[in-house]
Image: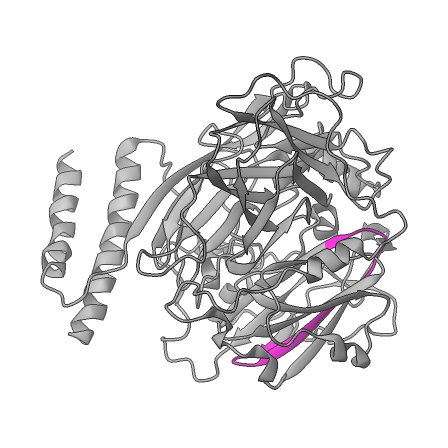
Amino acid sequence: MATLLRLSLFYAIPIAFLSGLCFAADPAVSYDFKLSYITASPLGVPQQVIAVNGKFPGPTINVTTNYNVIVNVHNGLDEPFLMTWPGIQMRKNSWQDGVIGTNCPILAKWNWTYNFQVKDQIGSFFYSPSLNLQRASGGFGPFVVNNRDIIPVPFGQPDGDIILTIGDWYTRNHTALRSSLDDGKDLGMPDGVLINGKGPFRYNTSLVPDGISYETVNVAPGKTYRFRVHNVGTLTSLNFRIQSHNLLLVETEGTYTVQQNYTSLDIHVGQSFSFLVAMDQNASSDYYIVASARFVNESLWQRVTGVAVLHYSNSKGPATGPLPDPPNDVYDKTMSMNQAKSIRQNVTSSGARPNPQGSFHYGSINVTDSYFLKAVAPVTIDGKLRTSLNGISFHNLTTPVKLADQYNVKGIYKLDFPSKPLDRPPKIDVSLINATYKGFIEVVFQNNDTVMQSFHIDGYSFFVVGMDYGDWTENSRGSYNRWDAISRSTTQVYPGGWTAVLISLDSPGVWNIRTENLDRWYLGQETYMRIVNPEENGETEMAAPANVLYCGALANKQKPQEQSSSAITISRVKLRLLMTILWGVLAYFSILC
């Protein structure tokens, strides 16, 4: 106690100074995340899942634009762990990205504190594990970034915020799924779909066993709610719909959309959407909330359906009868793609800053580089089942790129990732894209695999300017949307088709490009962009954090970590972080003043 008191008095010094500064500092919020295994039975079968603070899914991170976010992650698992934040744009700070190419893993029984700012950003996201298929067992949760009070939102204040995590689910845990892939086997059909970590309402007695716990969403008649829906699953695109209710799309992954009503929307692995839903029905009974498998044999995959219940406070009885129909596109394979193309940016609204999102005229900027990234079905490379991009199956780094650069460790990676597929057999390698700082690049994802895929780029939002079936050609640029294309961080690429995106490379660092389909990701379908400012002077990219972990070629630099299970140790960690933030703010504003 005496030690904590001395620390508190010492840290009070910058607080006193801050009271006289000419500006107020950006707020900071702190979370302690304890990862552990718990036993749950979401589909009626007891299994091991990954919980955050004893919860599955984990708690919501709820912050506002420009907040500093501190998350102390305690790894209570029996294997290394990393937490990543898809869609959160950590400007200048890939040290906090939480993927194996930028961070050493948090060893079992260790903890590590992430510290980053959600700068110039709003929207609906989620956090999740990034290693070894762990997300297939849980460890995920919602991440909400709210507008500042001075920035108008392009719709009326909803009467409530409802978060739904949806995703396919296996009753085998992630280690068993890994073993299947290591043995060269496909993961096969999932065992079901979970909504907020719970199994389906028993809408069908033959498909759904008795006794399964399901999610109930309680609402009041005449109210309007914002539904934030995240596909946190393993590999399955899902069609989301609410019986007898329209979905007014308003936001996706940090961008306000042109507001359009949908009766249902396809949400692909890794994607997040916000809808306004009016409670305008007569409540003669409860209503189904459905997330069902897409782009598969839907009759065979009928059990891969999540069902929750929308319960009006004046409901006269439980939901009964068949589920609302899924999209019927057996004879029109372009229906889903046309729906995706209809999602456009609301160029008249503000985002995180008090200026229109559409004021960035991306369509008139000259493209500096083009990358054509081709994915194909898994093949055997060196006796192992692998996936690849442009014929390179990524081999996980043992020493993160940023650490290798800082300590001038040679031979960790190559900067020779091909800008288009090479005419040679695929190989396993560690090859990165040598991207140009402040470049404006075109990336075309060509999916020659047999399954729907989602592709994600860490640290950035990109403009989804075009998609189509068939092979992309240079003539395809004539179909690009150069005015109000949606800006997001995860895009779908249809099997046998392509998706083109434009990206402004304004954030130095090392940023992961990957498929969000966990099986394809695990087998090597990823790379990184290494972006270096040649005139770096300490202002455009943050230095390594004081608590950086060391591994691989630099493992001898890592000191043993004290166990942080006691409240005193946790308090010290928080106080040290507070001191760092406050002294940094003091130094910054002393210059301004």
Q: Quick one: quadrant of the C terminus?
A: bottom left
Residue at (69% x, 75% y) in the render? 416
Q: Quick one: quadrant of the N terminus?
A: top left
Q: Position of residue 388 (x, y in %)?
A: 78, 60
Foreground: 293 or 290? 290
Please report the bounds of the magenta region as a residue range: 435-453
447 magenta-colored: yes
Foreground: 552 or 237? 237
Question: In the image, 31: left or right of 132?
Answer: left
Foreground: 68 or 469? 469
User: Is 10 rendered above or below residue 415?
Assistant: above
Splitting the image into 4 quarters, where does residue 538 fall? Answer: bottom left
Does residue 488 appear in this view?
Answer: yes
Q: How is the image coloured?
A: one colour
User: Is 475 rendered above or below residue 68?
Assistant: below
Question: In the image, 547: left or right of 456?
Answer: left
The residue at the far right in this view is 331
